[in-house]
Amino acid sequence: MLAPPWISVPPPGYGGVESVVGALTEALVRRGHAVTLFCAPGSESSAKVVTLLDRSHPDEIERSLYEVDHVSRAFEEIDLATGDESFDVIHDHCGFTALAMADRIQTPLLHTLHGPFTTSTSAFYARHGHKAALVGISRAQLSSAPAGLRAVGAIPNPIDMRTWTLREQKDDFLFWIGRMTPEKGPHRAIAVARAAGLPLVLAGVIQPGQQDFFDREVAPHIDGEAVRFLGEVEGSLKRSLFARARGLLVPIRWEEPFGMVMIEAMACGTPVIAFPEGAARELIVEGKTGFLVEDEAAMAAAVSHLPSLLPRNCRDWVAEHCDVDAVAAAYERAYRSVARQASARSPEYV
């Protein structure tokens, strides 16, 4: 399991990929696999942990110096492993370096696509995507992929249902959580809550470059009553907010490839109202786990229908499709396919 070098696994705070890697690794170990986790210093896991750099680099994400160093050292250890210590498959979550160099290592590599396809990344994948098998995190993400990728299909991000508690009695507030960017829509969530006549709780990290947007579009509305801002939340507080909220607002305006907050809310029995962008069309079952709406006015109108949705239905859908054991089973099938086809020297993927 090749994790990024930036943040430890599991992450101490914000770290979407690292949370996915941590949950999946633990599930694979529970299911009897021998897993080696190549990761940032400070990581903890039931798997064999191998840290390659002197320190993590949370403030230098995507800086090629550290990614290349991390991947090249991991490839060296993988290449040198023999006998019972050798590897069947590399599962890469690292970014771009491992995929670009996948044809230079004998162990077959499965690369999970964690980000959206942009003009730049599409050009990269068009050039290097044939070098390894690829997994998308949603069908929506794969639909925008360049031609010629060796895609084995879409496998959703995992959630460990054991750590999220169903709550059937909801409080009278709406919840929004995410990065403070226009495409994530905290300002739209404020407008929706105001129109619906319910208080709104906002939570999330303000990353570099986002302060001006926050100061202009969000901060003027924060009054501690109608609109509260809690900053970055984690652990029991985060789970409590998801569980207690009447609904989660996801007024995104971009083709988000997954949307972890949606399944975290539904795991607690909290329905989601979202715009039909990206993976939201796959994660929300209309009238059962939430509502897909076209604009802020329709989102505000849908708030009044939230009490008609059964919290148990939300949780059951997530358990069936996204629980970490279901996701681990899907990856097991992908690993076996990749390993078999590499052994047979066949380029054919389904």
Image: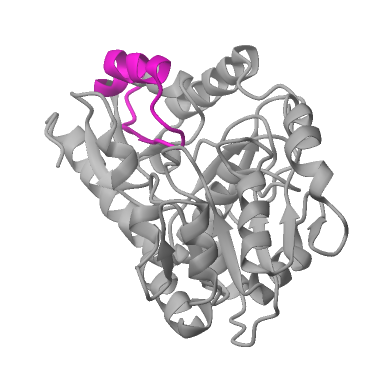
Residue 279 drawn in magenta: no
Indicate whether 75 appears above or below 134: above
* Quarter of the view holding residue 249: bottom right
Question: Residue, x 59% and y 23% (percent of image)?
Answer: 70
Residue 342, position in %: x, y?
Answer: 21, 33
Which residue is at the front of the view, 313 or 109? Answer: 313
Residue occupying image coordinates x 34% and y 20%: 122
128 magenta-colored: yes
Nearest the camera: 98 or 278? 278
Q: Position of residue 110 (x, y in %)?
A: 34, 36
Q: Is residue 116 above or below residue 308?
A: above
**What residue range appears in magenta?**
104-130
- Residue at 49 percent of width and 27 percent of height: 95
Percent of width and height locating residue 237 = 78, 66
- Closest to the observer: 120 or 332? 120
Q: Quadrant of residue 242?
A: bottom right
Q: Indicate the position of residue 153 as horizontal and vertical percent values.
A: 25, 45
The residue located at (65%, 74%) in the rendering is: 243
